[in-house]
Image: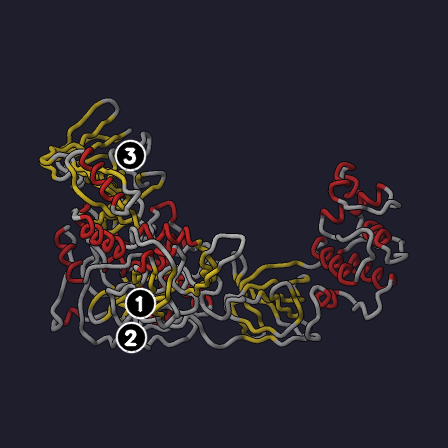
Amino acid sequence: MSSFRPKLREALLALVMVGVLWVAVSPGDSGSLLAADNGVAASGRSQDAGTRPAAEKGLQLATPSRLRVGLATDLEELSLPCCDGDLIAESNGRVVAQVSSLRVEPGAEIKTPAVYRLQAAALKDESQAKGLATQLGSRFGLPSDVVFDAGIDLYRVRVGRFSTRQEAEAGQRKLVAGGLSGAWIVSEQAELGSAELRVTLGKKLYHSPGRWLTVRSESGNGIRFQNTRYRGDLLVYLNDRGLLNVINELPLEEYLRGVVPREMGPGEYGQIEALKAQSVAARTYTLKNLGEFQAEGYDICATPRCQVYGGMSVEHPLSDRAIAETSGEVLVWNQELVEALYSSTCGGHTENVNVIFPQKDVPYLKGVTCLEAGVDRIPSRMPRGTEFPSGLLDQLMPPSGATLSEQVVGARLEHLALLAGLPIPRDRLASLERREVQRFIASIFDLALDARLFVSPEDLPYLLDDPPATWSEEDLQLAAYLMKSGLLAGDLNEPLTAAEIDETLYRLAIYLRVVEKVEARYLGLAGGQLQVRLTEENASYVVGDRLATFRHVGARTVSSSLALLAGDWMELFLHGDQLLAVVHQVETAGATYDRSSKRSSWTRFRSDAKLTELVNDRYPGLGFQGLEILERGVSGRVGSMKVLGDGGRSEIVVGLAVRWTLDVPDTLFTAKRLTPPDRSPGWLFTGRGWGHGVGMCQVGAFGMAIRGHSYQDILRHYYTGVDIVRTSPSGAVR
């Protein structure tokens, strides 16, 4: 998402310029009441905190009837394939042609010939790109500016304006002499006169006057562009550089159907309340920033610079439902739409906006904790520290006792066969020698034929390491089969241990379907029932008096009382309808809402050579000798740092530019200087979070939803003091 947006008044003026209607009503008008949503979540949590009284007067906002989304910029031509449904091309209100295959090329009178420029960099951070442009312009005495490329989501820093390529090459040498290498020559149109679009249908060329061409689908199946299908219309716009911009024009709510699942995937984050929160934030963000790219012919871009937009191909029933159930709802503060920033993973705490985006300072974007106190507890019913799976096996069959003998092991194997419904052969386990145990397993569980069919003689020297010389080929074949199937493994020359026997019993119980292992996400405890989310549905299981409970931390799984938070992963072990055991996968990230994210923790090593390259991309000629952290925000994120350069020079880097300068996922990190004797020196960055960390934490929203919070709870937690209001295309407040 973007780091900088115009104020609401500037956005309103831009909307007027592009023909989008907004209705502003005097605060004294009785029709301008804010429709604050003051409902109560399904969980029973109050929604009153931070909500304005419904009688308070404010703005009445209307959503635009159509939205223009920039899909690509500066194309030299556009081709649409044939046979892609019933498409019609229109220009200046008239049909140009029924589209089969279509190619569009720019055509314009050039009042000023093409100019040549030097592209010095392409950066992600807008303020950093503008700062570099200003620095280069002052340093080399050349005009410089920044052009945003919606197709690649980067800010292109360009220097100089040259009438010939030879002059541009001379300027390039001047930059190199001044310490800036790597700039390359590009061309731009300086000024256009009369404009037209050249449209080729089959072998026939049409000249369409003006800058706009509309491609419309009559079938309603959307229009395909660059392997993605889009709702609404596809617009082709001849920009001021004499190249083509491709724009998708469609209603706001249909646009959101292609945004919400890209920003928060319903498959991974399948909680409707979290998706509703994302829908309201994305809708607010869109309306707040409409018209920012009006000079390019569109309102908002389709990349992370704005919001990621995937068209029809990413639509999902669950996110569609979230959008529909929050239709028209937006966030406001002090009678204005809020800057609804959000990021993937906040690392346990969001940050004050001015720390990351120094040009902003609004009270609703304050750092908040991304966690909640309190856990659900299930006491242990067995001695603490009992190893898994022996504790589970004690739920299925008589305990093994302290003495390991062939009588006890044989009885347990026979009991397991009985539970599986297998006939018990007239056979007995003669000893605990490894060869005898595997023979007895094959006999009692009828595995001898499996071994002969599924293991070839050629497998034996590959699978078995230094087998006993006295074993027959049948013994070796059975050992290889048990190893392949995971039922019994280990050094064939060593005696069996109690732990190996328990592991074999456990794996046999799973293999024979005596025990079913199910992965689930914990939801809560109610009325003695364990409530979980399975892959496709919710389920409940009785917490019985003999339930075995285990904690899995690191490499150990041992019996323990459980401290559970909604969203925790667990493995359930079922015998029929009876819940025998639970293994709790303890989240080492702690109790934060966003702990389920795979991006919650990270490390990055950057060599001095790499850091020199990164720094020089943004501060040409500075070099890199080290860094100092100067300021941290409330979450611990780096607000500013000093980059130490060559010759005693330095540069202060602030906000989000810290992230891009160091090429790290977030600015919540520690930095350690490493100088290994046998490798290149550099810096180790250890961090949490992923993104800028301001506003709503998307994975945190998912965690809150799992714990029963409504989307209103989520939004009011991450955006301090906001109201939730509903707008409509007509301007009426509902």
Q: Position of residue 598 (x, y in %)?
A: 48, 58
Residue 87, picture quadrant:
top left
Element marked by disc 2: loop
Quick one: label 2 or label 1, which is nearer the N terminus? 2
How far is disc 2 from disc 3 in space, using C-alphas?
A: 49 Å
Q: Which residue is mark 1?
A: 355
The answer to whether residue 255 shows anywhere in this view is: no
The residue positioned 18% from the left and 43% from the top of the image is 160
How far is disc 2 from disc 1 in space, using C-alphas?
A: 26 Å
On residue 51, the disc is 2
Q: Position of residue 309 (x, y in %)?
A: 33, 50
Tell which tag, 2 or 1, sits nearer the viewer.
1
Tell which tag, 1 or 3, sits nearer the viewer.
1
400 or 578: nearer the eye?
400
Q: How is the image coloured?
A: secondary structure
Residue farthest front in this picture: 647
- The C terminus, quarter of image: bottom left
Residue 59, picture quadrant:
bottom left
- The N terminus, quarter of image: bottom left
369 or 165: nearer the eye?
165
The answer to whether mark 1 and mark 3 are in CB contact below 8 A is no
| Kind of residue at disc 1 | Val
How far is disc 1 from disc 3 in space, using C-alphas?
A: 51 Å
Q: Could you tell whether 633 is left or right of 132 in the image?
A: right
The residue positioned 53% from the left and 63% from the top of the image is 521
Q: Which residue is mark 3?
A: 86
| Kind of residue at disc 3 | Asp
The answer to whether residue 537 shows anywhere in this view is: yes
The residue positioned 24% from the left and 44% from the top of the image is 175
Element marked by disc 1: helix
Element marked by disc 3: loop
Quick one: label 2 or label 3, which is nearer the N terminus? 2
